Image (cartoon, rainbow, N blue to C red):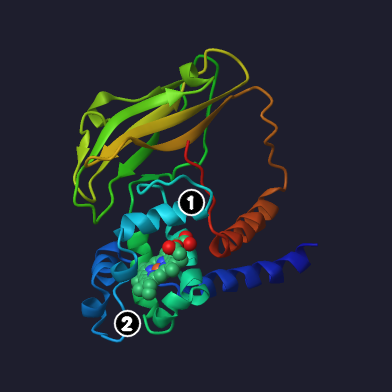
Amino acid sequence: MHRHLLPAALMLCLLVNGAMAQTPPGDAVRGKPLFENTRVATGNNNIANCTSCHTDGVQGRRIAISLNTGGTADPYADIGFETAMTRFTQAMTGRAEMRQFYGVLTTQQVSDIAAFLADTPKTDPASETQINLTAALNGNSPARTVTLTHSRTAAESLSVKGVTLEGSGAAQFHVGSAAVSCLANSVLAAAGSCAVTVTYAPTGGGVADADLVFRMSQGTSGDFYRVLPLHGVVTGGSSGDSGGGALGLGWLLALAAAVAGLSAARPFRRR
Ligand code: HEC
């Protein structure tokens, strides 16, 4: 069995490398003038400025991308770079009005514009990524750090208004020390970041689920959110997560997931 899986794994490696080589990383700071003043930024007068049609600016495009990928009409939605690439590329090939850009913008310019479209406040780990924590009953898990980073091109600062734990298991988790908390540095300039730590401190057996919720606003915007699900497991209980030769397969599955992630737009929810 493993003799058959190895070539497959190598193929996946090549696919991953190939896909990455085709998409250079984007730079939102370069993408902003390409979107707002396309002719000047590209030196090409035969194409239109993005904003000549998209008169509501980049925020209007973020709303469109969010709505078209299952989110709400939120100009501050957590749009991933790959999602922005997919939506932008599909629009260039699928919309007659946008075909003028296809093959005319360089791959670097396309990436830079996608990075600008995706340039909204982000958490690391990304929002909607489940954080798994384990601790002994009445003990403490190691602290996990979550950073919040403001977008790079925003004209307004980001106000962090709340970092809270919500949901049924909220009492089993703790948000750490005020000294490093985002609330102590609640106004972030463009590209600024802050960090919080989260620990699991179970006082009852079994598992606990909660959400780590960042509430924020930007300029005169209404509140918007980033949400990270927390999952706590008491060690010594039956976690069902045993090893036993699963490592090799797990590695292959991770590779397969990485390949799938490159082609599929990452779905996200906003709660
Ligand atoms: C001549 C008009 C025109 C120009 C110029 C134009 N677009 Fe579009 N674009 C459209 C139309 C029409 C649609 C489809 C309807 C919609 O989403 O508003 C669209 C759709 C899109 C979408 C898809 C949103 C989604 O999720 O479906 C993106 C992203 C986008 N445009 C980005 C850009 C960027 C970036 C530029 C500049 C490089 C640009 N557009 C220039 C007309 C234009």
Instruction: Give above or below for 51 relative to 240.
Output: below
Measuring from the top left, give residue 24's x and y in whole percent.
40, 72
Measuring from the top left, give residue 235's x and y in whole percent.
59, 24
Foreground residue among 71 and 247: 71
**What is the residue that sits farthest to the right in this orientation?**
1
Does label 1 point to a residue whose CB lies under 8 Å from ligand 1? yes
**Label 2 or label 1, whichever comes before in sequence order:** 2
Foreground residue among 200 and 74: 74
Q: Which mark identifies residue 102?
A: none
Question: Few, some or many C-alpha atoms within 10 Å of disc 1 (few <14, some 14-19, many ≥20)?
Answer: some
Instruction: Name which residue lies at 25% across and 64% down.
Output: 29
| Quadrant hosting residue 255 | bottom right
**What's the amino acid at mark 2?**
Ile
**What's the amino acid at mark 1?**
Leu
Instruction: Name which residue lies at 40% across and 82% down.
Output: 100
> Residue tagged by mark 2?
47
**Cβ atoms under marks 2 and 1 closer than 8 Å:** no
Instruction: Name which residue lies at 46% across and 36% down.
Output: 228
Instruction: Give above or below for 21 relative to 75.
Output: below
Instruction: Give above or below for 64 relative to 143.
Output: below
Does label 2 point to a residue whose CB lies under 8 Å from ligand 1? yes
Q: What distance separates the C-alpha of mark 2 from that of mark 1?
A: 27 Å
Measuring from the top left, give residue 266's x and y in whole percent.
53, 54
- Can you tell me which quadrant of the image ligand 1 is in? bottom left
> Residue tagged by mark 1?
67
Dot 2: what SS? Answer: loop
Q: Quadrant of the N terminus?
A: bottom right
From the viewer's perspective, tell me whether residue 10 is left or right of residue 96.
right
Question: Few, some or many C-alpha atoms within 10 Å of disc 2 (few <14, some 14-19, many ≥20)?
Answer: some
- Please say whether residue 142 is visible from this viewpoint: no
